[in-house]
Amino acid sequence: MGEEWDLAVVGAGPAGSAAALRAAQLRPDLRVLLLDRSGFPRDKPCGDGIAAHGRDELALLGLPALIDDYRPTPRLTVVSPGGLRVSAEAARPNHVVPRRVFDARLVEAARARGVEVRRHRVRELVPDGSWVVLDGRLRARTVVAADGANSAVRRFIGLPAAAERHTALAVRGYADVPESDDVQLIAMQRAGWPAYAWSFPIGDGTANVGFGMLLPRLRAAGAPGRQVLHGRLAELLPDRPARELRAHHLPLSTGRPAPGAGRVLLAGDAAGLINPLTGEGIYYALLSGRLAAEAALESPGDPLTRYRGKLRGALGRHLRTTDVLARLAQSPGFIDAAIATAARRKEVFDLLVEVGLGAGTVPAPLALAVGLRWLRGATGLSR
């Protein structure tokens, strides 16, 4: 019959570890298996940014001090496609923690909580009544698939990958910066828009730097992808030559698939949960992993229905907001108008941070104000 588990989690990044941690936190007697094809610590191409909402999730998982040894980055500077600049202190500071460190700490915390952690690549998944069978010998009541943008489990259950129009490609590296640098920078570029570079200081004299753009725009650039991404990163951040450059796909939430099938629940990147405005995914990963575990425990007979409802309650309005904003943001002028408004009104700046890095929504009066400013700019009227 093979081994039997109450919950099997495939992928030990933030989403998978959060699922395992939450299950063991709520039910210490539960048999929880956490699988990953890699050993830890391991590198993972990512912006490494952990926003305040991510810290909230860590606290809910019983790990409030997990990244306390990393210095917060309180300030954020955003440069719009048209060159408008806004710089302000965030209402709550962000952190930048390399995924090599962050993911390994989450895995170790899960192991300390009694989760069985194994290095294993899943090659087959078969539903079997009230069980799901992995590789012919691991049987689980519920499976959480948190195996990333190219999720094998998602393919096994017949759900497609995100369409190209809902996929971005980014390159990430590290650069030397002054140890005093505590400003997260996002520099947008009109060419090939939507496209932007970032520099997120870690606090040790290095910064995570990168550049990303939508995959269709990259293909239309007329040059090899590596040349475009590396070249534009160097162009936008000329004072921060990057090393350790690695590319990664970002399946944006505008093209998210169904959140699972049967007893298999998708979380994090596997579920297409990446903010289409900023590329942020760690908060979504921690949140969706936690909710998947809760659904598995609360509704073992039908975890998907419960999970779907939990996602809707936590992110429904927010994801509808980002879906609309992502369509509007196809025009760089709309982003110019939003940044111009944020430069004049701190509460707007804070709200944009909430939408881009957390679960915020945009009130109708503010959307109207930005829209009118955009229209005035588009028609050449005085601002």
Image (cartoon, rainbow, N blue to C red):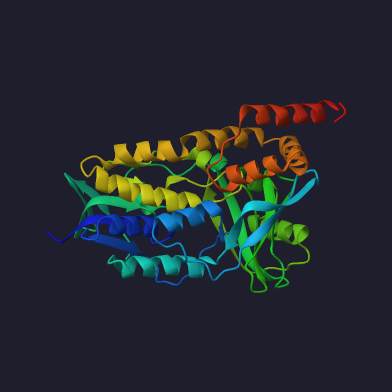
- Name the side, left or right, on which 158 lies relative to 186: left
Q: Position of residue 316 (x, y in %)?
A: 46, 35
For image coordinates 34% across by 59% down, the residue present is 21
Front in this rendered view, residue 244 or 367: 367
Q: Residue at x 17, y 45 (%)?
A: 130
**How many numbered dots are placed on residues in this image?**
0
| Quadrant (top left/top right/bottom left/bottom right) for the N terminus | bottom left
Q: Is residue 287 toward the left or the right of residue 303 in the image?
A: right
From what the image shows, is residue 283 above or below residue 376? below
Q: Position of residue 318 (x, y in %)?
A: 52, 37
Residue 2 in percent (x, y) is at 15, 61
Of 31 and 151, nearer the camera is 31
User: Quarter of the image holding residue 263?
Assistant: top left
The residue lying toward the viewer, choosing from 223 and 60, is 60
Query: Does residue 15 lie above or below 310 as drawn?
Result: below
Residue 123 shows in the view: no
Q: Is residue 340 left or right of residue 76?
A: right
Q: Position of residue 137 (x, y in %)?
A: 19, 60
Is 284 displayed left or right of 94 in the figure?
left
Residue 133 visible: yes
